[in-house]
Amino acid sequence: MKVSIDLLMSQSGVKFGTSGARGLAADMNDFVCFAYTLGFLQYVAREIVSGSENNRVAAAYDLRESSPRIARAVRKAVSYAGWKPIDCKTIPTPALALYGISEKIPAIMVTGSHIPEDRNGIKFHLPDGEILKKDETGIRQQTVEIPDDLFDSNKMLKSAESGVSAETDNGKAKQYYLDRFLRAFPSGFLTGFRIGFYEHSAAGRDLLYELYTALGATVTRLGRSETFIAVDTEAVRDEDQALARQWATGHSENPPFDAILSTDGDGDRPLLFDEHGEWIRGDVAGILTSRFLLADCVVTPVSSSTALERSGWFKKIVRTKIGSPYVIEAMRNMVLEGYKRVAGYEANGGFLTANSILLDEEESKRPLSPLPTRDPAIVHIATLRYAKDAGVPLSEMVHYLPRRVVMSDRLQNFPTELAQQKIEELVSGGEEMIQLVFAAFGELQTIDQTDGIRMMFGDQDIVHLRSSGNAPELRCYTEADTKERATSLLYQTMTILDTWRRRFQHDSYPYQQ
């Protein structure tokens, strides 16, 4: 049976999000996952590298319930395509990516990242890192041949066909990741730090515990869960913030912490709370991490805080669309332009490096090797050490930056088509339409259409709207000089967005602005 990947994406509802395909777990049946894997490998073999030269493919998965089943379908497709699947089991995405880069082989991660458990996804990595947008287009253009007799009427692998022999990586992916940091940082780099580590259901919970302990920190494991918890490092749940504050109070069973650390589900985005249990936003931590690495060029999406520019710390700053593929592509361009310490980060905190960076010429024996995919560990380590070197607690580090506060939220179950329609109405309506809808926000100063619509009003208040690429959500980011103002902007904007959604769902709902 011949299957067009582009047509299958339209029909199945499982579409490309960030660095791969995402959709409802129920829609990600074995047939769909098998086909997408074939499309990816066919693209790799035709456009990137011949499968006969190095025909291994690394695969791993997160801890959500549907992931092991999807991973089996992925490994089956790898084997069917004539490649050798390497089973890395449950490891975080950056560890799998680093293994693929080190071994010069493709890698496939089954994960829905931070989205709810009823959804899942597949992230594709080329031998040199994440797929970019041009690669997504190339994969969509593939037509693959799938045998008719592998799947049952529900498009699941028949029981006799579901098994596939796969080599294990023998712990190499884990060791590559540990070695990247242990070789770059001096022995005992985190000695004296007391870390509370919120494990929940993160794929990297055991690996990061081992890393921080090996670097000398005293780590207390907190909140381990055997059921999947959708932790979003950009729109942090109220219950996660409450837990962090509770742990930070230093009850008798826990010592006081210098920080409480965590990640999202697949372990590629950091979650960082100070010694009081207060959340430090990812784009704030990204600036501090870039400064710690003495970056000469920083790449980040338009949604990140403008404190980056106001800091005056960096020679070159590049703004992109939201999504690691855009950040990675821009970082590569900056390396070609001659920048030697190129770093990138997203508002969700995921941090990327494009060059080998020597951290300390006197103490470090080896540079930190480049990792052009989101990683949380460097953010955790860098912010802790930066605070210690400055002689202040983590809570005071934010005062090193110009006072800009970013708030964000998302309206779930917001149809993608409606989100795109409303943003287009604002763009096409121009200043007159925007001033009508956001009359309470002051005079419109500028409009940025890099990704969605980003509007700056008087006093440099910012409201940014964009449709999520991963789920039917409309995301909102606000920025102002004070938390109170940013919060007010967010509340007012979310009320407007909710009005849009309710009017769409109920034609009789009276539209009032």
Image (cartoon, rainbow, N blue to C red):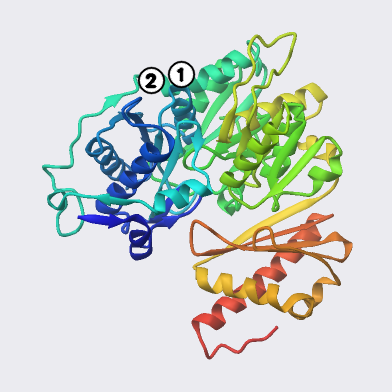
Do the CB atoms of the residues marked 1 and 2 lie less than 8 Å apart?
yes
Q: CA distance from mark 1 to mark 2?
A: 6 Å
Looking at the rendering, in which quadrant would you find the N terminus?
Answer: bottom left
Residue that appears at 28% across and 47% down: 34
Amino acid type assigned to the residue bearing label 1 in the image: Gln
* Marker disc for residue 345: none
- Work out whether 158 lies above or below 316: below
Q: Quadrant of residue 110?
A: top left
> Closest to the observer: 330 or 202?
330
Local crowd size for mark 2, using a 10 Å CA cut-off: few (<14), some (14–19), many (≥20) = few
User: Can residue 62 be seen from the camera position used here?
Assistant: no
User: Can residue 487 be seen from the camera position used here?
Assistant: yes
Report which residue position mark 1 lands on: 175
- Work out whether 147 lies above or below 293: below
Instruction: Residue 484: give x, y in percent of width and height.
Output: 79, 59
Q: Secondary structure at mark 2?
A: loop
Q: Secondary structure at mark 1?
A: helix
- Work out whether 430 lies above or below 236: below
Looking at the rendering, in which quadrant would you find the C terminus?
Answer: bottom right
Amino acid type assigned to the residue bearing label 2 in the image: Gly
Q: Quadrant of residue 490?
A: bottom right
* Marker disc for residue 171: 2
